[in-house]
């Protein structure tokens, strides 16, 4: 991931440089500053492994690819074959950034002691459209104002800054919240931390876990997956544990001895659970 990220100035950067070559000095300067700032933010994220780093990387990487595609379509300074190669090379960091292994690697940079964090898949309702719209609002909120001001569109630029800055802050926080949902294996057992389905994290002791396995299709366990796509894991407990379940804006207090969740790497979680002497199947 670090190696491919370091190549972006020579791939996407080359295309963007050609695309902005004929623009005004101010627009070119703002565009160059934005590109280098985005690349530096991604590099810093890969050096300082934290959940925030995952959010930064997954917001910036698609922007680099989108910028490369736009630049190739806007410029005729390079041959078509060269542009295609540079676009494909710009796509490699995007693909890597969204691999489950990269997400786990970054999130576990902030893990405490002998714990393993396993990110949860994004809720299905968010993947259906709001996720892309939030990313577009974030990008537009950050870039539109400075570029309009550089183009001497003063009124539009000021309005874009006034509207875009708050929008970028709100959408950025919303996107970052998706990087803070985990199932955590700790020496004491399993913790499910998911602010989408639970008000507070739920800890189940290792001795209380009867079985942890891939959920069968006909299970009637409590669904805490938020309708996320992928393989759900089922936890069977010897006794019911209390939890506060979130259903939209409502809270439901109850107990359950069986529940489901959807990690991005179910096989790795089961393997680590077995190593920690949790019965898996």
Image (cartoon, grey):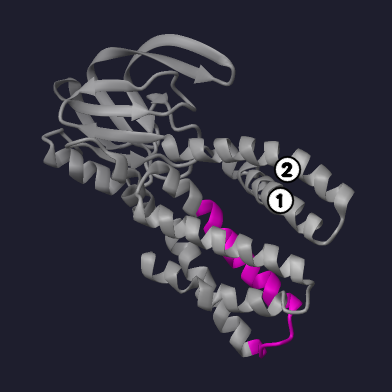
Q: Decide if residue 238 is on the left or right side of residue 20.
A: left
The residue depicted at 62 percent of the width and 83 percent of the height is: 83
- What's drawn in magenta, residue-wise? 58-80
Q: What kind of element bears circle 2?
A: helix
Residue 101 vs residue 255, the one in the foreground: 101
In the rendering, at what x and y percent does residue 177 appear?
50, 35
Q: Residues within 10 Å of mark 1 (few under 14, many from 20)?
A: some
In the rendering, at what x and y percent does residue 204 appear?
24, 21
Q: Is residue 199 above or below residue 271?
A: above
Which of the 4 quarters of the picture holds residue 118? top left
The residue depicted at 79 percent of the width and 46 percent of the height is: 160
Quarter of the picture containing the C terminus is: top left
According to the picture, the residue beneath numbered tag 1 turns out to be 140
Badge 1 vs badge 2, beta-carbon distance below 8 Å: yes
According to the picture, the residue beneath numbered tag 2 turns out to be 164
Q: Is residue 206 above or below residue 132?
A: above
Of the numbered discs 1 and 2, the one sitting upstream in the chain is: 1
Q: Main secondary structure of the magenta part?
A: helix
The residue depicted at 38 percent of the width and 38 percent of the height is: 232
Q: What kind of element bears circle 1?
A: helix
Quarter of the picture containing the N terminus is: bottom left
Q: Is residue 259 above or below residue 18?
A: above
Q: Decide if residue 228 is on the left or right side of residue 14.
A: left
Q: Decide if residue 119 is on the left or right side of residue 73.
A: left
The residue depicted at 48 percent of the width and 11 percent of the height is: 252
């Amino acid at each position: 991931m670090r190696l491919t990220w370091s190549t972006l100035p020579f791939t996407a950067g080359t295309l963007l440089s050609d695309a902005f070559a004929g623009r005004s000095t101010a627009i070119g300067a703002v565009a160059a500053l934005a590109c280098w700032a985005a690349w530096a933010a991604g590099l810093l994220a890969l050096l300082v492994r934290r959940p925030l780093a995952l959010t930064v990387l997954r917001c910036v990487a698609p922007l680099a690819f989108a910028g490369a595609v736009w630049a190739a379509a806007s410029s005729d300074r390079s041959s078509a074959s060269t542009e295609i190669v540079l676009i494909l090379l710009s796509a490699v960091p995007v693909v890597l950034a969204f691999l489950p292994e990269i997400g786990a690697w970054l999130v576990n940079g902030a893990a405490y002691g002998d714990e393993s964090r396993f990110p949860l898949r994004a809720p299905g309702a968010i993947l259906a459209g709001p996720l892309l719209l939030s990313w577009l609002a974030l990008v537009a909120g950050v870039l539109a104002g400075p570029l309009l001001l550089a183009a001497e569109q003063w009124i539009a630029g000021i309005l874009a800054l006034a509207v875009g800055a708050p929008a970028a802050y709100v959408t950025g926080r919303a996107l970052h919240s998706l990087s803070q949902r985990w199932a955590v294996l700790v020496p004491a057992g399993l913790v499910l931390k998911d602010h989408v389905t639970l008000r507070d994290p739920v800890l189940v002791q290792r001795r209380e876990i009867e079985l942890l396995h891939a959920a069968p299709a006909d299970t009637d366990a409590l669904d805490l997956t938020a309708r996320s796509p992928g393989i759900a894991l089922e936890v069977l407990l010897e006794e019911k544990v209390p939890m506060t379940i979130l259903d939209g804006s409502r809270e439901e207090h109850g107990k359950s001895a069986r529940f489901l969740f959807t990690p991005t790497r179910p096989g790795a979680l089961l393997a680590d659970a077995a190593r920690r002497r949790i019965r898996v199947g």
